[in-house]
Amino acid sequence: MILEVSHLSKAYGDVRAVDDLSFSVRSGEIFGFLGPNGAGKTTTIKMMCGLLRSDQGSVTIKGSALHEGGWKGSRRIGVCPQHIVIWEMMTCMEQLEFMGRMYDIEAKRARRKAGELLEVFGLAQKKNKLARTLSGGMQRRLNIVLALVHEPEILFLDEPQAGLDPQSRVLVRDYVKSLAGTMTVILTTHDMEEAEKLSDRVCIIDGGKLLVLDTVENIKNQLGQGDFFEIELAGNQGRELLALLQGSPERFRLQGQTLQLVSHDAVTILPQVLQAIKEHGLHLENLRIRKKNLEDVFISLTGRGLRQ
């Protein structure tokens, strides 16, 4: 394991943002670190990066405690924050060289790496332009490059695709994929589809506590085998249909006005459901059958309620 979080806790007054959190990250994996707003992700990341001292517990990188590693420990880490942080009055190349020098990277090597990254992220023609003249999407890409120029062993990406156009999203996704096996990536995102595509393993937290940690497939199987059914009826008829199906051996559940079911036996189940709808004069608005995805598990674990 390249990074280990052990019994990490952090409180702000009476609010326990992180509560006895423990997990390990493997070398070279893309690790999805997920949770709803207010789950404790940002606080945990700050402690994992050495930017915030924990109340209890420890973070170790290759067996060395991060808070004891000082500058040596931080050199192993690259951080791309959710909000864009760049030097607007420096050119792209100037700030990348400056960032390299901050990490004691020899100037020629930093310039070479900066050139490679600017090319990969479609910014080569902007290398001598002031950062403030770049579009928002370009600034986001530059922010990612700044986290990579010193060639860290562990890269933290906090919502790296926020504000990117579709082409840029694909570019960033492909680059992150290319890092698998060579750099450890800890990815936070609210885009469950993106997390599912990229992550080797996923950790979901809420209320500062670990809810689940496993591969995406194993986590999805927690909802049971089979396809995912969603049946939407008009008004409050979903609750009425659920009552009509209580005698069914299948386990239906109501989320809002949507009736949900995971089952292998669509051929048998669907005619029964449609017959009940017809016989009782209910109005079917939508019927979907699809494979389970990570968002289904996320909602199942954390609920549908909005977070501040």
Image: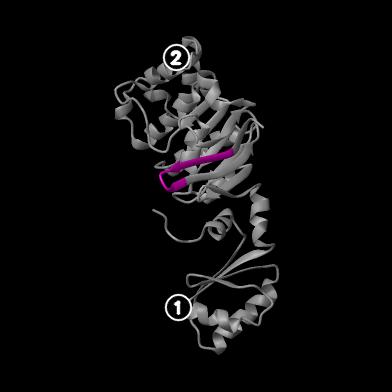
* Spot occupied by residue 258 in the image (x, y as percentages of width and height): 51, 71
Q: Nearer the viewer, residue 181 or 300?
A: 300
Q: Which mark is residue 255?
A: none
Give the amino acid at mark 1.
Answer: Ala
Q: Secondary structure at mark 2?
A: helix
User: Is residue 10 rendered magenta in the image?
Assistant: yes
The residue carrying mark 1 is 234
> Which of the image's four quarters has the N terminus?
top right
**How many numbered dots are placed on residues in this image?**
2
Q: Nearer the viewer, residue 193 or 74?
A: 74
As measured in the structure, the alpha-carbon distance from the residue carrying label 2 to the one carrying label 1 is 62 Å
* Spot occupied by residue 104 in the image (x, y as percentages of width and height): 48, 13
Report the predominant secondary structure element of the magenta stretch.
Answer: strand
Q: How is the image coloured?
A: one colour
Give the amino acid at mark 2.
Answer: Arg
Q: Residue at x 62, y 60 (%)?
A: 291
* Spot occupied by residue 140 in the image (x, y as percentages of width and height): 40, 34
Q: Which mark is residue 101?
A: 2
Region in magenta:
7-16
Q: Horizontally, is 59 left or right of 103 in the view?
A: right
Image position of 40 with respect to 48: above or below:
below
Q: Nearer the viewer, residue 43 or 92?
A: 43
Q: Residue at x 64, y 32 (%)?
A: 28
Image position of 105 with respect to 267: above or below:
above
Q: Horizontally, is 124 left or right of 238 in the view?
A: left
Q: Residue at x 52, y 82 (%)?
A: 240
